[in-house]
Amino acid sequence: MPVQGETQDQTPRMPHERDESADNQASSEPSGRAVGQAAYEDIERGVVDTDKGPVLDQTYDKVREGADDPVKKFSP
């Protein structure tokens, strides 16, 4: 339990404080290690990144070329 205030009394944490606190996170989460290992093995095997972000960015930039302000990005 963390201590708070001038007297440093122990105070129970709120739910969001428990979820986000560093001391509540597992330092070596097995699933996180497995994902990292799989990513490393994919890179070693030469697997190509299938992320669509760069392709979508190129398409968006091409569409914006004829706009009044082609540099300005759309924001809803």
Image (cartoon, rainbow, N blue to C red):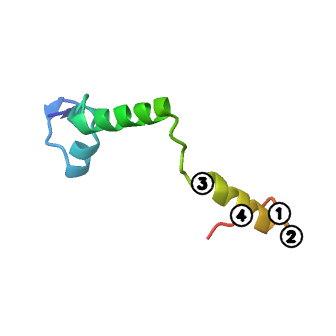
Judged left or right of residue 3, residue 45 is right
> What secondary structure is marked by label 1?
loop
Q: Mark 2 points at which residue?
A: 66
Judged left or right of residue 27, residue 68 is right
Residues at marks 1 and 2 touching, judged by CB atoms closer than 8 Å: yes
Mark earlier in primary sequence (3, 1): 3
> What secondary structure is marked by label 4?
helix
Front of the two marks 1 and 2 = 2
- Looking at the image, can residue 47 be seen? yes
Front of the two marks 2 and 3 = 3
Q: Mark 4 points at which residue?
A: 60
Which residue is pictured at 13% across the width and 42% down the height?
A: 12
Q: Name the residue under label 3.
A: 53
Residue toward you, 68 or 44: 44
Which residue is pictured at 26% across the width and 39% down the height?
A: 31
Q: Label 1, label 4: how many angstroms apart (C-alpha)? A: 10 Å
Can you say whether 24 is above or below 76 in the image? Answer: above
Decide: few, some or many residues near mark 2? Use Cα within 10 Å; few <14, some 14-19, many ≥20: few
Q: Label 4, label 3: how many angstroms apart (C-alpha)? A: 10 Å
Q: Name the residue under label 1.
A: 70
Q: Quadrant of residue 56 in the image?
A: bottom right
